Amino acid sequence: MREIKFRGKRVYNGEWVYGAYFGDDKRRYIITQINDAQHAVYGYRSNDVELYVVDPATVGQHTGLKDKNGVEIYEGDILNWWGPNNQEPNSNVFFNDGAFKITDPCSDTWEYLIDVLNGAEVIGNCLENPDLLEGGTSDAD
């Protein structure tokens, strides 16, 4: 069974944080540590958990998979992979219809992530490296 975890960028400093994801009426959070297992079940006090406010637009779920270099793959990551036509264009990881998939930016097609995992490599993510996808623009532009 895969570990369910998420990543998101902190609102206050833009750093990535990893852990459990939840929200209330006003904010979204990533919990990185729970110091008391009892409070994880029955509720929490602020000194029992380490949590961060994150931008919901940056949140992505861990796929439970790693690339050829052992790097965890998350929604929004950009992969370079080898397909039937030798090297495929850089592709975006997304979740749809109960499965993690990747897009082909040169066409309207997609593949299941698990089917192209062999030889795939995380080379960036859509938020920080949109220029890696064909037609994307970077914040540095």
Image (cartoon, rainbow, N blue to C red):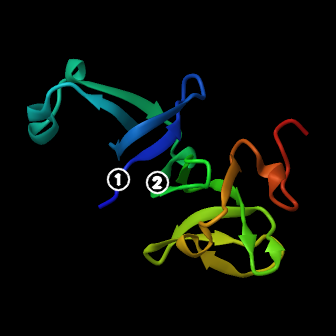
Q: Which mark is residue 73?
A: none
Side of 36 relative to 95 (left or right):
left
Between 10 and 115, which is closer to the camera in this rendering?
A: 115
Mark 2 and 1 residues: CB-CB less than 8 Å, in contact?
Answer: yes
Q: Position of residue 123 (x, y in %)?
A: 72, 49
Q: Position of residue 15 (x, y in %)?
A: 57, 28
**Vertically, is 91 above or below 39?**
below
- Asked which secondary structure carries label 1, the reply is loop
Work out which quarter of the rendered image holds the N terminus and state it.
bottom left
Residue 28 can be seen, yes or no: no
Disc 1 target residue = 4
Residue 63 can be seen, yes or no: yes
Residue at screen point 24% across, 22% down: 46
Side of 141 relative to 9 (left or right):
right
Between 73 and 140, which is closer to the camera in this rendering?
A: 73
Side of 37 relative to 73 (left or right):
left
